[in-house]
Amino acid sequence: MRIDIITVLPELLESPFNASILKRAIDKGLVEVHMHNLRDYTDKSYNQVDDYQYGGGAGMVLMIEPIDRCISALKNERDYDEIIYMTPDGKTLDQRMANSLSLMKNVMVLCGHYKGVDQRVRDRFITKEISIGDYVLSGGELGAAVLCDSIIRLIPGVLNNETSALTDTFQDNLLAPPVYTRPADYKGMKVPDVLLKGDFPKIEKWREDQAQARTEKLRPDLLE
Ligand code: ADE
């Protein structure tokens, strides 16, 4: 899989891709992530990429011209399955969306900034608009990092058996069961007996029951 991220703040996206599972996925060649600084695509002085909005009002708007240049240059090189715009008014990211995006070959992600992008960018180029939740961030970069993490960890080979995504919360529309590690007794707080006995069918049943009970208690909306 290849992900191209268009941003005015590439430095904000450096560390998430340089540590842990995402770094390992890139090092193993399972995903390529390319950053494109929007300022490299403007011919305005001071590398300007934004301007005041027509009709007045607070906040700058990212201009269509550098975005068109960048997206068009990328589209000339390969076909994209989705061109995503990160925005608080997009569809809220969930596990189902991450699952489906993880099967794609080439994905482009445009990060908004300031008041957002000129509407004509959305009308002309964008195939999917994604929000990471009902709150407003300063830009799309942190949302893009969250989106990419949720997708990349699902690519076959990225996680090993122990960290398999199949047992993640949300994979069956259920929250994950509780987990424990050593010691079995910490200051009187004991690990459930069933986990210590090695009866795997029984453990599996216990985990299913816990997942169901936890979901009913904490997120009944997932069961509707
Ligand atoms: N940009 C600003 N706020 C955002 C959000 N909640 N999700 C995605 N991109 C954003």
Image (cartoon, grey):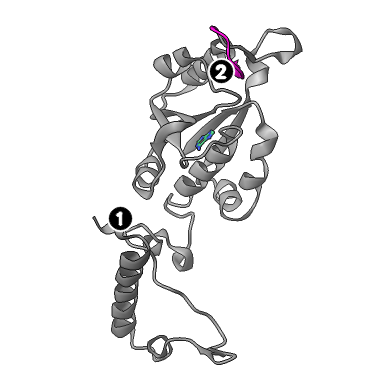
Residue 161 disc label: none
- For the residue pair 101 and 79, the one nearer the viewer reads as 101
- At x 41%, y 85%, the residue is 195
Q: Is residue 213 above or below residue 10?
A: below
Q: Position of residue 103 (x, y in %)?
A: 37, 42
Q: Amino acid at mark 2?
A: Cys
- At x 51%, y 19%, the residue is 71
Q: Amino acid at mark 1?
A: Asp
Residue sitting at the far front: 57
Q: Position of residue 204 (x, y in %)?
A: 31, 78
Residue 70 disc label: 2
Q: Is residue 173 above or below residue 119?
A: below
- For the residue pair 105 and 191, the one nearer the viewer reads as 191
Q: Is residue 211 above or below residue 105?
A: below
The answer to which image quadrant residue 92 occupies is top left
Q: Secondary structure at mark 1?
A: helix
* 2 vs 1, front mark: 1
Q: Is residue 59 magenta?
A: yes
Work out how far the residue at label 2 is from the one at label 1, CA to CA, in angstroms: 41 Å
The disc, 2 or 1, on the residue closer to the chain's N-terminal end is: 2
Task: Check whether the beta carbons of the residues at disc 2 and disc 1 lie within 8 A of each other.
Answer: no
Q: Which residues are magenta?
A: 54-61
**Which residue was labeled with disc 1?**
221
